[in-house]
Image (cartoon, rainbow, N blue to C red):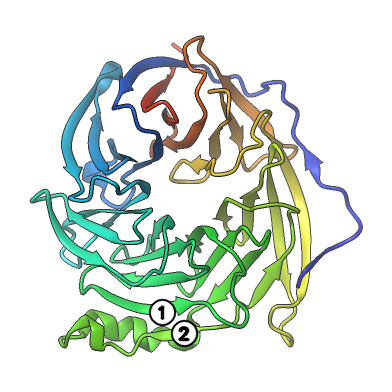
Amino acid sequence: MAKIAIGSEPVVGSLTPSKKKDYRVTNKLQEGKRPLYAVVFNFIDSRYFNVFATVGGNRVTVYQCLEGGAIDVLQSYVDEDKDESFYTVSWACNTDGIPFVVAGGINGIIRVIDASTEKIHKSFVGHGDSINEIRTQPLKPSLIVSASKDESVRLWNVHTGICILIFSGAGGHRNEVLSVDFHPSDIYRITSCGMDNTVKIWSMKEFWTYVEKSFTWTDLPSKFPTKYVQFPVFIASVHSNYVDCNRWLGDFILSKSVDNEIVLWEPKMKEQSPGEGTVDILQKYPVPECDIWFIKFSCDFHYNATAIGNREGKIYVWELQSSPPALIAKLSHAQSKSPIRQTAMSFDGSIILGCCEDGTVWRWDAISAS
């Protein structure tokens, strides 16, 4: 287990907005009565950068952000099981570039919805419990990873329907996995975190032939030689409680727990001994009243900023790549009082969406300095 290096103290951001960028509410949608757990823009396909998806209850809804704050409903998918409760959604595509919306939740089934036909393309059964997060490989958007309550992470090919790898076993998580993310440039690397309070970095390098084989497999998906990855290359104890969101920032990692802050840290590996090493905590981005679990932050495409909601319906927008961290904006509205489970920043960060426990979606637009 990697230990936190003693020495330089992390730089903590001030909650006084410094980079004044103003956002205003331009829309509020009431999608239904059930909580909305996830919202995500499509960063896979430049034709659809202004398209986003939400999930709540047994429904997946696809919208388009229009000029002037308007939001159009494009599609709505209702799962056949009325007791399904989706917790996560991601955009992916097949090898021809057809956009897919991929959702998972309490039933442990991943639904791959073909957005061009509005029909289910595939359903992935394999996880033994609910699915907490799905993420797409930005360099190969037919690959997705899923994090589950069954203590495992799985790598899937949405084009062929194959479960390629299962990250679980001797060195795996010892409780629910809450979040997972692909490295932005190192195609072999993922990071995962969860209720065992750890963040783990995994490498697929020695299993990559199986990933390539998954694209050309013609037999039944169930006959594919799925492999177990039992040992991560790095394990970090950065937090002392559940870790419910982690994202790569280059080779650094942003992660958060239930203690009112996002932490930026650097994993320093020991080449000789896998799993060992030290953690250098670089910066902390405070987020008041963010002490309940399952609140996830989001970033714009270039990771210039992050937006995170809290349990009181406020959103904090931090500039990521400045030191000390600079608070860009604090967004609050008299009628927004419900916990914001996830935010979505648009490609350039000019739109911020929040999806809430009370079934609402809020749209904030940056006010141009004219």
Residue density around tag 1, few if under 14, some if 14–19, many if 20 or more, within 10 Å: many
Mark 1 belongs to which amino acid? Leu
Query: Looking at the picture, how far across and down is residue 18, in whole percent?
Result: 68, 22
Q: Quadrant of residue 301?
A: top left
Give the image quarter of residue 262.
top right
Question: Quadrant of the image for the N terminus?
Answer: bottom right
The one of 287 and 299 positioned closer to us in this rendering? 287
Amino acid on which disc 2 is placed: Tyr
Mark 2 Cα-neighbour bin, 10 Å: few <14, some 14–19, many ≥20:
some
Element marked by disc 1: strand
Sequence-wise first label, 2 or 1: 1
In the rendered image, which residue does mark 2 sit on? 228
- Give me the disc on residue 165: 1
Q: Residue at x 17, y 84 (%)?
A: 220
Q: Residue at x 11, y 48 (%)?
A: 118
Horizontal and vertical percent for residue 214? 27, 81
